[in-house]
Image: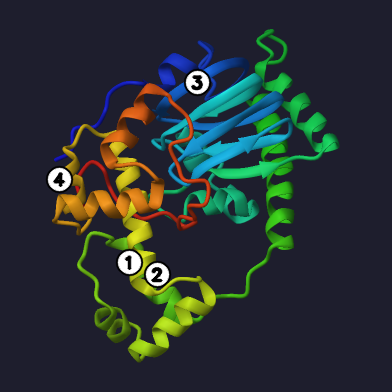
Amino acid sequence: MASTRSKPRYESASVFNPDGLPVWADRHRLDGEVAAHEHDFFEIALVTQGRALHIAADGDYTIQPGSAVVVPPNQWHAYGQCEDLVVFDCFVAPELIDSTLSFLDAELPLMQTLHTSSLPLPQRIQLGPRDLSLAIAELYSMSDVSPARRSRIQVVGHLLIYLDILNRAWAADRETHKLVPLHPAVTGAVQLMEEDPGRSWSLADLASATCTERTHLVRLFQRELGVPPIAYLNRLRAQAAARLLVQTDEPIAQIGARLGWEDASYFAQRFKNAYGLSPSAYRKRAVSGESRYHLAEAHLPVSGARFDTRTGN
């Protein structure tokens, strides 16, 4: 069993206001580098000033005023190259989303996306000036601690308006870049690999499972995802490895073996092809907070490999 890193990790009890409401908003000025960290709640980071790199398992992304990043619970992220960066954070307890606001999956595709994988990636949004102003107003309302304003109904109401603002911008961007639905054989093969990236999948296995001839399956993957099936599997494995390297103290060779790369040298080679660094260098830089530890041209899967750091299953 992997030894999960205990620090830096931020718990709900140390973040939310003492009044017990499961929502909190606050502004932070971030200077320099912020090392990789995780938390047991949703974090929505909205940039109101400055620039930086937001770093997570899916790569490095420049953030600027209007950039919002929705980070799911238990998913690491970091900041690099911060330049006069001010972030208005909103923290939401997962039990609020999963119980009281369970209807959000049906109403907001943004929230549904965060629940479609056991390893969801951060969702990135760019707000225009008008939506940015509206969003900041809701955040200020959520951060108001005066007795007349911190009622549960009011705070949750402001949160819902804020999420709706984010969802509209997120949905509009995806509509602009809307993709044609994948061929059923590609969808089926992708799902199999995401559910068990550590299995020794062969092209023959995937073709048989999707009732597709091997050469045809390769052509479908090349046409719709730009890579053959096994190359896609290697990307999924690299992404799962990145998470394990940052969030656990598990030996590097053991991580590779769990993901189907029994040979440590081959694991290091595959990982470096994806991230531009060896697994050991990636772990060191992520924990220390150094930036630019992803290849700028690396294009990792957008769906996220379903891989449990706690059980290895």
Residue located 46% across and 39% down the image: 56
Task: Kindly identify the amino acid type of the residue bearing the numbered disc 4.
Answer: Gln
Q: Is residue 10 visible?
A: no
Label disc, if present, on residue 193 of the rendered structure: 1
The kind of residue on which mark 1 rests is: Met
Image coords of residue 170 (percent x, y): 68, 49
Position above or below: 240 against 248 = below
Label 4 vs 2, first from the N-terminus: 2
Cα distance between the residues tagged 2 and 3: 35 Å
Residue underneath mark 3? 33
Quick check: 244 left or right of 138? left
Q: Crowdedness of circle 3 by 10 Å Cα count: few (<14), some, many (20+)?
A: some
Provide the residue designation for mark 2: 190
Tags 3 and 1 touching, CB below 8 Å: no
* Residue to which mark 4 is pinned: 254
Cα gap from disc 1 to disc 4, whole angstroms: 20 Å
Above or below — where is 154 with respect to 199?
above
